[in-house]
Image (tube, rainbow, N blue to C red):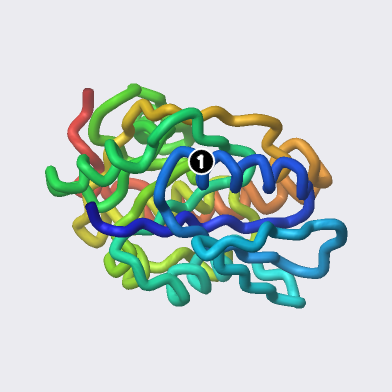
Amino acid sequence: MEKVTVALIIEGFGADALASIDSILNSSDANLMVLINGKQENIEIPSNPRIEVIEVKQKLGWGNAINHLLSEITTKFVVIMDPSTTFKGDAITPAVKKTNEGFVAVGWRGGLVNVEDEWRTVEDKEDGEVDVLFSYFMLVDREFAAKVGANPSAKYYRNADLEFSLAIREAGGKLYQLDLPLEQGRHHGYHDVDPAYREKHSKENYNRILRRFRGKSDILSPRR
């Protein structure tokens, strides 16, 4: 099987990040690239030949952080994953296997854009081809994803992963949602940020999706 690198963006909450890292090491043979995003305290990543740590003093927004990781990693596949997610088994092998069927990205959670709601919502249809994937766990073909790129304007993750997904589809890539042995704990990126900041940037990201993609039904996956 092709080698895979799991990319993690660490922004505090070190105990959860370390639990996520430990679960990846114990349930896969993947490498890890850990981005310490901005000045932080009390986070000591374990020394392990499978882990590479990069640090940036000036905190990057989500889009720039993803693009930085995609540019630094050299393996064929990259898992973009939130450190609130933990492995409960081998989640990587079935995801990589699905790429053999022509999918550029395979993720754990996602859905279909609700065109009847003017693209304002996403419906979870469970396993199958989808329009968007969430960045709780998203395995991507690195070269394809790097060429598309996450939007540098996306400072915050929420809805930015949807924009990234739709950009992949616009470039001709297919996405698949697959049930995987994963578990999500408290999503600090959502629950533990200033609510006004969260809503402002989530709205900005989604408004950008609507301006860029709404009405382009040809980029969507088959309805089901």
> Residue 204: horizontal and vertical position, in percent?
61, 54
Amino acid bearing label 1: Asn
Residue under the point 46% across and 38% down: 27
| Location of residue 210 with respect to 50 vertically, above or below | above
> Residue 171: horizontal and vertical position, in percent?
24, 61
Q: Which one is in front, 166 or 175?
A: 175
The answer to which image quadrant residue 192 occupies is top right
Residue under the point 52% across and 73% down: 68
Q: Quadrant of the C terminus?
A: top left
Q: Which one is in front, 57 or 173?
A: 57
Q: Say whether residue 79 is left or right of residue 197.
A: left
* Label 1 CA crowd tier, 10 Å (few <14, some 14–19, many 20+): few
Residue under the point 79% across and 45% down: 193
| Location of residue 62 with respect to 90 vertically, above or below | below
> Residue 136: horizontal and vertical position, in percent?
52, 41
Report the residue that reaches farthest toward the right: 41
Residue 42 appears anywhere in the view: yes
Q: Say whether residue 100 is left or right of residue 217.
A: left
The answer to which image quadrant residue 173 occupies is bottom left
Q: What element carries label 1?
A: helix
The answer to which image quadrant residue 64 occupies is bottom right
Q: Which one is in front, 212 or 66?
A: 66
Q: Say whether residue 109 is left or right of residue 100.
A: right
| Location of residue 76 with respect to 131 vertically, above or below | below
Q: Which one is in front, 90 or 135?
A: 90
Q: Name the residue under label 1.
A: 26
> Residue 115: horizontal and vertical position, in percent?
34, 33
